[in-house]
Amino acid sequence: MSLSGILVQMLNGLASASTLFLLASGLSLIFGVTRIVNFAHGSLFMLGAYIAWSLTERMSGALGFWAAMGLSALAVGAIGAAIEMLLLRRIYRAPELFQLLATFALTLVVRDAVLGVWGSEDLLGPRAPGLSGSVEILGRRFPQYDLALIVIGPLVLALVWLLLRRTRWGALVRAATQDREMVGALGVNQSLLFTSVFALGAALAGLGGALQLPREPASAGLDLAAIGDAFVVVVVGGMGSLPGAFVAALLIAEIKALCIALGTWSLPWGGTISFPKFTLVAEFLVMAIVLVVRPWGLMGKPQAAVRTGAPPETPLAPADATTRIIGFATLGALAALPLIVGVGSYALVLSIDIFIGVLFAVSLHFVMGPGGMHSFGHAAYFGLGAYASGLLLKSAGLPMELALVMSILGGALGAFVFGWFCVRLSGVYFAMLTLAFGQIVWSVVFQWDEVTGGSNGVIGVWPAPWLAAKQTYYYLALACCVAGVLLLRRILFSPFGYALRATRDSVLRSDAIGIDVQRIQWIAFIVAGAVCGLAGGLFAFSKGSISPETISVGRSIDGLVMVLLGGVETLSGPIVGAAAFLFLQDSIARHIEYWRAMLGLLILVLVLAFPDGIVGAVRKRLGKGSQQT
Amino acid sequence: MKGTKRALALALGLALAAPAFAQAPIRIGEINSYKAQAAFLDPYRKGMELAVEQANAAGGVNGRRIEVVLRDDNANPGDAVRMAEELVSAEKVDLLAGGFLSNIGVALADFAKQRKTFYLASEPLTNKIVWEGGNRYTYRLRPSTYMQAAMLAPEAAKLKKKRWAFVYPNYEYGQSAVATFKALLKAAQPDVEFVSDQATPLGKIDAGAVAQALGDAKPDAIFNVLFAADLAKFVREGNTRGLFKDVSVVSLLTGEPEYLDPLKDEAPTGWIVTGYPWYAIDTPAHKAFLDAYQKKYSDYPRLGSIVGYSTIQAIVAGLKKAGATDTDKVVAAFKGLEFDSPIGKVKFRPQDNQSTMGAYVGRTAVKDGKGVMVDFVYRDGADFQPSDEDVKKLRPAD
Amino acid sequence: MSLLVVDRLCKSFGGVRAVDDVSFSLAPGELLAMIGPNGAGKTTCFNMINGQLAADSGRVLLHDADISRLPPREIWKRGVGRTFQIAATFASLTVVENVQMALISHAGRLYRMWSRAAAFEREKALALLAQVGMAEQADRPCGVLAYGDVKRVELAIALANEPKLLLMDEPTAGMAPKERNELMALTRKLVVERGIGVLFTEHSMDVVFGYADRLVVLARGKLIAQGDVDAIRNDPNVRAVYFGSGKTVERARA
């Protein structure tokens, strides 16, 4: 490895940084102004690539190519405006993070739409006319198009920066980024501002996707690949800071390029270290380190408490008679289910998955609702629980019953370590640090073949013979689920639970009456981790195998969807949400070919019909303002 | 849930006016990541449909029609196992098939063992499914990672190149392909040097940087395991940067239409690859398959089509040999079962339940603006296996 | 003996000395007002006393013990209650639960996970609420109260740990004149009954001259005067730096 090699690798990093920046800048703008965690941003990026592919098929020549790039951006911008006007605008007053649910549903719809419209084959686009070759730099051939990208990134930064600094619209955007309420108070047409910001953000994502086309085929996996990177860049740079996003994109791209350049090294004490393997998780490592050292990102400012237009949550009250009756009746029905449907029935299998999902969602809700800590990496504790059980059973030879109990410890231990760092942060930074830890755990499990079985995971994790029958395991899962739910409920009504809600309501006041906010949050995080670990353990033994998928972002997002779908402000919300989500997913996936789109559409309908979540809506309909069930 | 059972069963066999069947159909439960891996699995499903149609037109199996019930596993092993439970308990399927991702394959294999259900793993490549994680209920159709790497290693040794670099997706498939290839190459050519290893995140390769890093290592030859979008990115960057100039490339799966066709006229030339040159295979069996496929779908088959088609063929053959559908008989029938796939005779090895389905090894070229395989030969999977003692050590006793 | 001693407190932001060598003290049962024009350093000084900001130098002594390096919650545990400029209560708890929360913390039971919080010293919490005239609204969610009522709840919370010192940052900000007087009269009454010392910042001269026993005056980070109401009214420094002319003071007196 030579100095010239490193220098050219740095150039490679610059080119990648441009794409990353385009992708992230739009997300940063959108979040800054609307406070929407736009999960569909990767989908917009993907649409940009696909639309650009279709346009370049029809428009040739240099002029045609660049026109296609611009038109793709415009088209995606228009799609963004439509999303904002038709969907998001209707749910701005919903509880925090609820919009995430809508944008998640959009990703499902867009993914299937792309398959339906463009087909399943990867679509490699043309090279950029006039920039298809390479130039010689330090004895290496470097793509001309990459040089163009290196220019385009900063150019777009400069243009957007001018737009924000030199126009009235830009001044409003900046003002709204600082303080959303203030803009409303100034009598500015808020909907127009939000729509335009969303459109611009979408257009930037679309442009990023389009410009990527000469480097990478349009494929149906682009959205997922893009969204994680986008969030990381935005958060590392500091929410709402465009220069920050640029610096972060540079930092991450350069670190990756450097890892690739370093290759594999022998260690003095034996063994080797393969730096390219770090590219799997480099951005998340960077994010974790940055957030631990600088809790507001490289160039961000401490965020004012992010409050939505939603009214404050109503106080908790113990279940009233009706709720108790419903609860006991449900429990009775569940206990009788194996007798009704028969012991080998699929209903039991699905129910076990739902019990596990409920336990997972309830533990997430514990930190997310009453705790106000939005964990985007909750699957880490699920996975740690699952792996603790699986590995202790298979490698350490623990009896299954004990291994299951140890799953609680696995989840708690993970939460103990990661929680200590996370509770020092708040808001979206907290969320992103949990995500980063989740991804780090995932990548360790994914790559540590000798211990975790790597990407294939661990098999043969079956329950002890006396628990192996479906109906027995059903009762075990039901018992664990009910115990977990009741335990967390009990805690929420205890002094600790009150203190947890107090820390969420007002850090200032909590501190002023002697509540150690971070410690309360940390302990709550550990409790949630323990219950979540149990869910993971139950999962492992119900499936007989575990793989890194148990820790994936997808599972974390599923958890968020369950909680939000049911209603984050109610105690039974996550229960109903988990049951509804899993049941719908299962039955739709078995019925309909384009099941993801269908599930997405259904969630959108629910989102628009029940902006407080399902249970929240039921409660409102019944006029039980202060009833928390 | 109950009333919907029927509706969701994509009864593939129904389409054709088949002979009247008196008995209830034989049901095959098929689980795959249809949406997440659509590029491979769309053709796969078409291949299956064709085979089912043909089998039923020919009188079905043991006087019974066959029917395939499809399930999408959401690329998630947990969901896959639930779908398997559903297929077995609610749909009452007679056996299971499918699986694309390796982690789903091993999960389903272990499920099959636990529930004592026959499972034919059609596509997952991991060695584990027949070796460390193997069991008597699970058979695998496609040539494994080991076999495919082993088919390429002798070709690589013939090149007499000294300095080798490696690029592969950073997960079990890539790692085990590279490990196998390195071991076999080293054995055939002891003076070989391994100068660079680039393990890239699946679906997220930083192609420019990787291409440069490989070039900087000044290799004489490269072994590539990348596929799909990663491959396209890598090939384009490598072409632009002159990486492949004067460097030989040996590459897994690249000759499969799924991965070669998207590259169009930028397909690499002169790479030694495994794949499926459907346009140039002139055996009667393949010709018959090709005609029927093109007639039915007005599209050409991909490798997925062959795998899907052969999956059904294998099951039909196994059920005929067993003369029944109960698991023990089917499991026994598959030991040493032989059938004629469109690409050759295939046998399920009794020692590890792996089929001997082979692959085509040849060189890539560009013809009429499209990537093709030329100078290819069919390598029978039976010839690319570790010794029986080694297999015995790896595989737990049934 | 002084309850609170502020001793040569300094704090700079960038190059600006926000609080510059400020010293004063406060006796039990005394209401001490801290006044000064905007930017005088009141809030900075206040936040160093209550532990939210770390001082660059100087000490804050409570009962002769140095509290200047302690976090707010530790200072609270030593008997210091607080109210905020913008009232801070727990919006998703009921009024009585807000007070109970403080009682739970005072009793050291924050980490109990099994007992029911709603039952904990409810009577005592209701009694505290009765003192501030909020007993009737005890079971309403705190998030729906009128602003003046929230301030009363805050006062009840602040009194829950039987404090020796109350720190009130602009206790009457955002209130109508009638409400202001009611709240300050209530505060005065409770303070005298319990012998609590009160340090408060205030913009309203009515409130300051009507209820403070003594005043400290800050300007540009420095303490320029301290003394009783009359002494401050007649202090030439205060007139020059703070009031600008004698007129304002006369009006305030009227």
Image (cartoon, grey):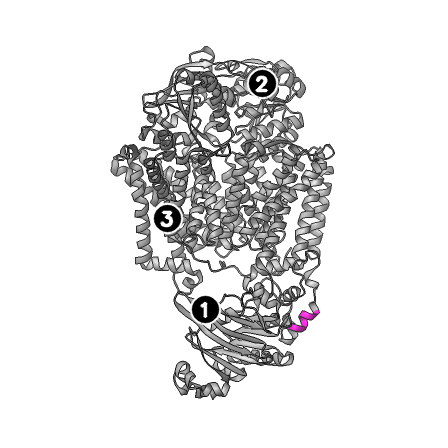
Q: Where A495 falls versus A141 (above or below)?
A: below
Q: Which circle, 2 or 1, is nearer the viewer?
A: 1
Percent x, y of residue B358: 49, 16
Disc 2 marks a residue whose amino acid type is Asp
Element on which disc 3 rests: helix
Element on which disc 1 rests: strand
Q: Quadrant of residue B5?
A: top right
Q: Quadrant of residue B200?
A: top left
* Residue behind mark 1: C11
Q: Nearer the viewer, residue B246 or B56?
A: B246
Percent x, y of residue A299: 40, 54
Which chain's residue wears label 1? C
Disc 1 marks a residue whose amino acid type is Lys
- Residue at mark 3 to residue at mark 2: CA–CA distance: 54 Å
* Residue behind mark 2: B390
Percent x, y of residue A539: 63, 38
Same chain, marks 2 and 1? no
Q: Which residue appears at 56% of the width and 40% of the height?
A: A551
Category of crowding for the residue at label 3, using alpha-carbon neighbours closer than 10 angstroms: few (below 14), some (14–19), many (at least 20): many
* Residue behind mark 3: A246
Which chain's residue wears label 3? A
Q: Which residue appears at 58% of the width and 63% of the height?
A: A510
Image check: A478 left or right of A615? right
Is residue C126 rendered magenta in the image? yes
Name, please, the residue furthest toward the front: A268
Percent x, y of residue A430: 51, 52
Highlighted range, magenta: C123-128
Q: Nearer the viewer, residue B120 or A347?
A: B120
Is residue A155 rendered magenta in the image? no
